[in-house]
Image (cartoon, rainbow, N blue to C red):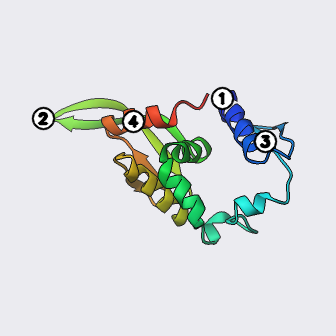
Amino acid sequence: MPGPGVVADVVQAVGDVLTSSAVSIVQRTGCVAVVSHSKHWVCLFPQHGPGMKYTRRIELEPWQDEIVREHPGPFLRGLFHSDGCRTVNRTRATVDGVEKAYKYPRWMFSNRSEDIHRLCAAALDRLGIAHRRSRADTISVARRDAVELMDRVVGPKT
């Protein structure tokens, strides 16, 4: 569950975008919901629609694409704070007949939408962050320099 830093960031962003709508926080079992009611949200997020997001096209409007191109870091921060995590990968390998244990930090982004994966990968590429698909629904950032850059760009989920 995201920590208070993420919630505060979302409340601030929602309030900044639609200044005429109230923003509230609703504590739910296992999560915190940030709520703002307005008929104008659909203008800002035309991708919203009925059904699961992975079953429909998710494409940015030209004005949204311009913002994401100019600010890929905050875009990645939102993606990874909502559908990602930073974890320590633990693995074993046999080197010269000796089994060794390795551990290293990595970032993982999991989402079933190919369109959202494409948008995430493009933002990572824009910032020069090495990544790969570790599973069909997962993007992994595991190279040391890439993880360090992600730590600076995305920051902790606090």
Image quadrant containing the N terminus: top right
Task: Return the residue at label 4.
Answer: 149
Mark 1 / mark 2, whichever is N-terminal: 1
Q: Amino acid at mark 3?
A: Val
114 lies left or right of 140: right
Task: Return the residue at label 3.
Answer: 34
Disc number for residue 5: 1
How far apart are labels 1 and 2 at the CA level? 46 Å
* Badge 3 vs badge 4, beta-carbon distance below 8 Å: no
Task: Return the residue at label 2.
Answer: 96
* Badge 1 vs badge 2, beta-carbon distance below 8 Å: no
Identify the secondary structure beneath mark 4: helix
Mark 3 / mark 1, whichever is N-terminal: 1
Q: Is residue 55 visible?
A: yes
How far apart are labels 3 and 4 at the CA level? 28 Å
How far apart are labels 3 and 1 at the CA level? 13 Å
Q: Residue at x 61, y 66 (%)?
A: 54
How far apart are labels 2 and 4 at the CA level? 33 Å
* Badge 4 vs badge 1, beta-carbon distance below 8 Å: no
Vertical arrangement, residue 13 with respect to residue 66, above or below = above
Q: Residue at x 36, y 45 (%)?
A: 129
* Badge 2 vs badge 4, beta-carbon distance below 8 Å: no
Identify the secondary structure beneath mark 2: loop
Mark 2 / mark 4, whichever is N-terminal: 2
